[in-house]
Image: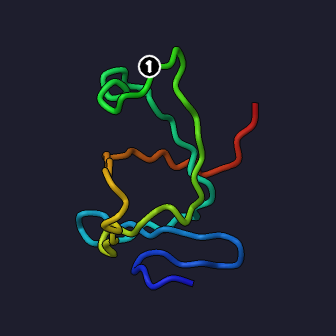
Amino acid sequence: MTSRPHLSASGDVMSYQHKYVDGTSIHFPLGKVVCIGRNYAEHAKELGNPVPTEPLLFMKPGSAVVALEGGFTIPADRGSVHYEAEIVVLIGKPLSK
């Protein structure tokens, strides 16, 4: 499905493999990615966005994740590109209310 080194597909589930500093791997399924945006007022202002009263929730597909060593290309005609560091919380079992 992909040539990215640490991404693989198994049926309908995409997974992402991350390596620890010592080189050992952790492998977990990657479904949807739930994001929280504009939760830092100064950052929202930097981007020219209104500062919301509550954080903005949005989702991305698992295919939006890029492997660390794989690299990626940004087309020249895309204009301004914004990037930021992210934190991930892995929930290893089903949640309930």
Left or right for 3, reference 85: right
Residue 57, above or below 88: above
Left or right for 39, reference 23: right
Residue 77, above or below 33: below
> Amino acid type of disc 1?
Val
Name the image quarter holding the C terminus: top right
Name the image quarter holding the N terminus: bottom right
Residue found 30% across the figure and 67% down from its top: 76
**Which residue matches tag 1?**
51
Q: Viewer-proximal residue, 69 or 82?
A: 82
Residue found 52% across the figure and 14% down from its top: 53
In percent of width and height, residue 47 lies at 34, 33
Crowd rating for badge 1 (residues with CA inside 10 Å; few <14, some 14–19, many 20+): some
Q: Please, which residue is most extreme toward the top here?
A: 53
Q: Please, which residue is most extreme toward the right here?
A: 97
**Callout 1: SS:** loop
In percent of width and height, residue 43 lies at 32, 29
Q: Viewer-proximal residue, 20 or 70?
A: 70
In percent of width and height, residue 50 lies at 45, 22
In percent of width and height, residue 49 lies at 42, 27
**Residue 6, image quadrant:** bottom left
Q: Is residue 19 visible?
A: no
Q: Is residue 63 visible?
A: yes
